[in-house]
Amino acid sequence: MNMLYAIGEMLIDFTAQEPGVLEITSTFRKNAGGAPANVAVCAAKQGKNASVITKLGKDPFGNFLVSTLAQDNVNTQYVFRTEEAKTALAFVARDENGERAFSFYRNPSADMLLNEEEVASIPFRAGDILHFGSVDLCDAPVKRAHMVAIEHARAAGALISFDPNLRYNLWDSAEALLTTVRAFLPLADIVKVSEEELADITGIADEKEAVNSLFCGAVKLVFVTKGKGGASAYTKDAEAWAPTDVNSKVVDTTGAGDSFIGTILGQLLGRGIEGLTKEELIRLITLANRAATIVVSREGAIPAMPTAEEIV
């Protein structure tokens, strides 16, 4: 079977147990998180082969994260360990609607020390998918590790997936983040963005016009998530939209977007993206929306990921 590889940060989410800003929050729950890891676990819980490519500290939090991946049947062969930095932490505040605010502790964290030598020997194959985000594109050596992994995956015939997952507070400036994202976008076959991210990245208000501007380089398939407005999918030849359950309970939105793209990538493993019809796109979005709806009804990201049986 083909493999979904997810490269980038894995960290501890300390999620607030009551609504409010971090300044007044007193109780937190520890959860495994990090967008690429969330995506891998999502696919694995739905019965797909998934592997995380990251670096963790040789510390108790790193041990916890490795154990979490193993329990969810995610391949940990490419989870490297270091004593040079600690495992990353994120404190997550929530408002009354489950929307989040993050405070990250990295500077640097272990994931930022992943290097190109560690990713150079990963045996990508045709039919595999390599997924990445923007959080670990902020600095070397991990940025270079991403570039090498993408080059090797492309050469092997694997598909590349990119979820920009914009986190402005991790960058020196918004322009630095957007410039980097725009440079990496053409390297991906599959792009997933929220409607807000689409406008920020392209500077174009109209959705279809903005999506069309993304079809450059290798990009062939674009997904746009819209919260309670459902989600859309675009290829150069087809487009589709599917609704989400607007009456669903929202507890915590952490991991919703990751479950969306994780579900889609799991479905595309081995199938590829050539010749996708409108009907196939609708099915992909529908399954992904169901996954996201389940995730937001639960606390945390990785603990909230649904099984295949829950989304059919």
Image (tube, helix red, strand yellow):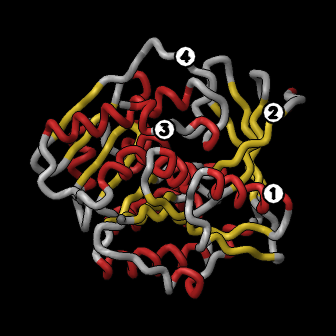
The amino acid type found where label 2 is placed reads Leu
| Image position, residue 157 (x, y; %) | 28, 75
| Image position, residue 114 (x, y; %) | 64, 75
Residue assigned mark 2: 22
Residue assigned mark 3: 307
Residue assigned mark 1: 61
- The reply to whether the C-beta atoms of the residues labelled 3 and 2 are less than 8 Å apart is no
Residue assigned mark 4: 249
Left or right: 161, with 51 as reference point = left
- The reply to whether the C-beta atoms of the residues labelled 4 and 1 are less than 8 Å apart is no
- Find numbered disc 3 in the image and state the secondary structure of the residue it sits on: loop
The amino acid type found where label 4 is placed reads Lys
**Where, quadrant-wise, is the N terminus in this rendering?**
bottom left
Separation of residues labelled 4 and 1 (CA atoms): 30 Å
- Find numbered disc 1 in the image and state the secondary structure of the residue it sits on: helix
* Mark earlier in primary sequence (4, 1): 1
Residue 263 sits in quarter: top left
The amino acid type found where label 1 is placed reads Phe
Q: Is residue 128 above or below residue 35?
A: below
